[in-house]
Image: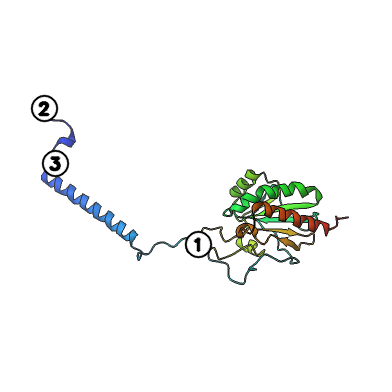
Amino acid sequence: MPSSSVWARPLPPVAAAALVAAVAVGVGAAYLALARSADPSTPSAPPLVRPPLPPGSYPDAPLAAGTPAPPLEAAGWLNGPYPGPDARTARLVVLDIWAGWCPSCRATAPGVLAAYHKYKDRGVAFVSLAGHDRDDVQAFADRFDIPWPCGYGATLESLARFGAYSADRMSAAYNPGYEVTPTIFILGPDGRVRWHDDQARPRHLTEVDTMTRNLDTAIDRELAATPPPR
């Protein structure tokens, strides 16, 4: 008894020829598309990359001790707004400019948090700045229980004014965010830089424990040189 399935019925000659032609055209088009994508001479859409900041428009190293710190600018703040210099009563301010690409920023976060708890009642304020969006900064703050003001959406220009920017990590296929160079600063009550960590985290200058000990040592030294406000 013949099968009733349509797959068992022979196609008429004309329909069969049309089907073969359609398959051939489809295979040819797919091969041509693959060949074009594999051809390095075929132009492709350029990556969406922001060009580097103009040379000379920013310091090429972290701001040195004695240099007035630029304003701390961000699109918004978590854990409360950062008090401006006119309202600030802290003896010192520890400023942490960080970036998500830097594993040492995550590795040293518990040590920086320990420094906060050690010095917060001695007139030392902490504040963070990052170019990431609110969600990324919130995730970082939540992960490490960071209680101090955290600025998000800081522009490259504002971070570069601190010398926390480098175009060396930029390329035709760079990952945005790599141009921010994490740096920790200590600022005095006059708004001037007292100390910076020489960008030890991205440069992997020392072990993580040494980095956090160096921060504690710098805070102790600067507190000794800064009398409490009257």
Instruction: Give the residue pinned by disc 1.
Output: 49
Left or right, 21 with respect to 183, comes to left
- Badge 1 marks a residue whose secondary structure is loop
- Badge 2 marks a residue whose secondary structure is loop
Callout 3 touching callout 1 (CB < 8 Å): no
* Residue in view at x 75 percent, y 52 percent: 125
Q: CA distance from mark 2 to mark 3?
A: 19 Å
Instruction: Give the residue pinned by disc 3.
Output: 11
| Residue 99 appears in the figure | yes
Residue 28 is situated, as x and y percent measured from the top left of the image, at 24, 55
Q: Residues within 10 Å of mark 1 (few under 14, many from 20)?
A: few
Disc 3 residue type (three-letter):
Leu
When asked about the image quadrant of residue 34, the answer is bottom left
Q: Mark 1 or mark 3, which is nearer the start of the sequence?
A: 3
Q: Mark 3 or mark 2, which is nearer the start of the sequence?
A: 2
When asked about the image quadrant of residue 75, the answer is bottom right
- Badge 3 marks a residue whose secondary structure is loop
Disc 2 residue type (three-letter):
Met
| Residue 82 appears in the figure | no
* Residue in view at x 74 percent, y 58 percent: 186
Left or right, 22 with respect to 64, comes to left
The outermost residue toward the bottom is 56
The outermost residue toward the top is 1
Q: CA distance from mark 3 to mark 1?
A: 55 Å
Q: Residues within 10 Å of mark 2 (few under 14, many from 20)?
A: few
Q: Nearer the viewer, residue 190 or 202?
A: 202
Q: Nearer the viewer, residue 69 or 215?
A: 215
Q: CA distance from mark 2 to mark 1?
A: 68 Å
Instruction: Give the residue pinned by disc 2.
Output: 1
Image quarter of the C terminus: bottom right
